[in-house]
Image (spheres, grey):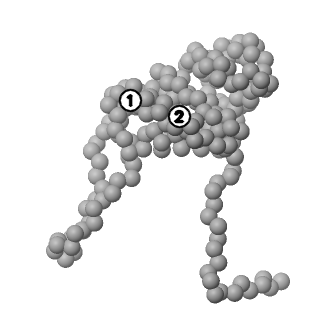
Amino acid sequence: MGPESAKSFPGRQLVRPLSGSEPEGTPAPRAKQEADYGRRGKGYIFGAFQPATGAALTAPYPSRSAANWVDFLERVEGWVPQEVETVDAIMDNLAAHRATDVLLFSLAHPRWEFVFQPTYAPYLNLIEPWWKILRSLALKGRRFETWEEVWEAVRQATIYWNAHRHPFLWGRRRRHRVRRRPGIARLPLAA
């Protein structure tokens, strides 16, 4: 996830309605946010996600270099239980994901299999909708002064997610049931 910087992240804010004492035709106030250019530090959040259990792991890094990627893969190797026989790592086509150091990592860890998603198809990777949830939990509606505050918010959101995790199914969303209105009969479809 990133690059993320220490800045203001918009969220939902209430706008007070008119009280009624204003003259007729007075427009309602608009939601406002001060300009924030976010030049107070930046970094990247690397993440691993197990859809079957919903467990997640995140870690901050200053850049998306191959060395940082391999360091994160080592963290994930220690995080995934040893009884798991195969680790399918689904990744995008970033150059750092295909570096020589990553190849050497895969040779040293034979249970790892790297699967590269097709270009322009992020919806195939289950971590993408999870990133959206994490951004909402950690960043939405907050202002950060330093990169460390951003990372702390992401760390706390990851802890919260892991405490309330659930299996994550691709393509499954909670849908509202269609309710029939009482008193209206449903006609059979004509063939």
Q: Earlier in the sequence, mark 1 or mark 2?
A: 1
Q: Residue at x 77, y 26 (%)?
A: 84
Q: In the image, residue 78 lies at what x, y percent?
A: 65, 19
Q: Residue at x 35, y 27 (%)?
A: 146
Amino acid at pointer 1: Glu
Q: Residues within 10 Å of mark 1 (few under 14, many from 20)?
A: few
Locate the C terminus and report the quarter of the image it occupies. Answer: bottom right
> What is the C-alpha distance between the residues marked 1 and 2?
14 Å
Please, is residue 157 above or below residue 174 in the view? above
- The residue closer to the viewer here, 62 or 47, is 47
The answer to whether residue 73 is visible is no
Q: Secondary structure at mark 2?
A: helix
- Relative to 58, is 79 on the left or the right? right
Q: In the image, residue 181 lies at what x, y percent?
A: 62, 81
Amino acid at pointer 2: Thr
- Relative to 91, is 68 on the left or the right? left
Q: Which mark is residue 158?
A: 2
Q: Residue at x 57, y 41 (%)?
A: 164
- Relative to 86, is 152 on the left or the right? left
Residue 178 image-quadrant placement: bottom right
Please, is residue 121 above or below residue 56 in the view? below
- Relative to 142, is 83 on the left or the right? right
- The residue closer to the viewer here, 153 or 71, is 153
